[in-house]
Image (spheres, rainbow, N blue to C red):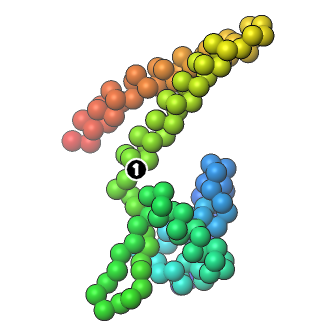
Amino acid sequence: MSLSEKQRELIEQIGIYHENNGFQPAVARVVGLLLVCDKPELTFEEISEALNISKSATSNALNMLLNTGHIEYTTFSGDRKRYFRIKSSNWRELFAKKMEDLSHLNSLLKRVLEVRKRENPVYDTKLNDFISFLDYMKAQMPRLIEEWEKSKA
């Protein structure tokens, strides 16, 4: 498979973004490749070759992305290979998970304020601002999603 220089650069930029959000480098590059590639699905071999990563790294990356719901695979009649693609239909689930994670963080931060003994008004103010923002975001998100849905119609 042939990738243009612009595609390779974008794969790297997407990879760096995902690395900064906790993905391992190979995992991050697989996401970038599957997003940028002209083909809708890629085989294990195509992914390994395009990214110049080992079979082990490719296997680990694909398994992690499958397990977390970022990608899916399909097969074709008469072909034993699996074809991997971005699971674009689950963005709402991933977003809901992120919101749930932020809600959990918010609960933990509220507990931090309850158990802290030291006096640090500047830190406490900043922490309270963040907690307040997370509360606001959680309250506003359903309305924003509803407005977005209406704007698409």
Badge 1 local density, few (<14 within 10 Å), some, or many (20+)? few
Tell me if residue 112 can be seen: yes
Q: Nearer the viewer, residue 118 or 54?
A: 118
Please say if 15 is above or below 59. above
Left or right relative to 13: residue 68: left
Tell me if residue 39 can be seen: no
Left or right relative to 116: residue 133: left
Q: Position of residue 99 (x, y in %)?
A: 46, 35
Q: Where is residue 66 in the image (x, y as percent from the top left)?
A: 47, 64
Q: Number of marks in the image?
A: 1
Q: Where, by quadrant of the figure, is residue 128 drawn? A: top right
Residue drawn at point x = 37 percent, y = 46 percent: 92
Q: Name the residue under label 1.
A: 91
Q: Where is residue 79 in the image (x, y as percent from the top left)?
A: 35, 90
Residue drawn at point x = 60 percent, y = 61 percent: 28
Q: Where, by quadrant of the figure, is residue 52 drawn? A: bottom right
Residue drawn at point x = 40 percent, y = 72 percent: 73
Three-letter code, disc 1: Trp
Residue drawn at point x = 42 percent, y = 80 percent: 82
Q: Which of 121 and 111 is in front in this view?
A: 111
Assign a secondary structure to mark 1: helix
Q: Nearer the viewer, residue 3 or 34?
A: 34
View extreme (left): residue:
153
Q: Position of residue 106 (x, y in %)?
A: 55, 25
Quarter of the picture containing the C terminus is top left
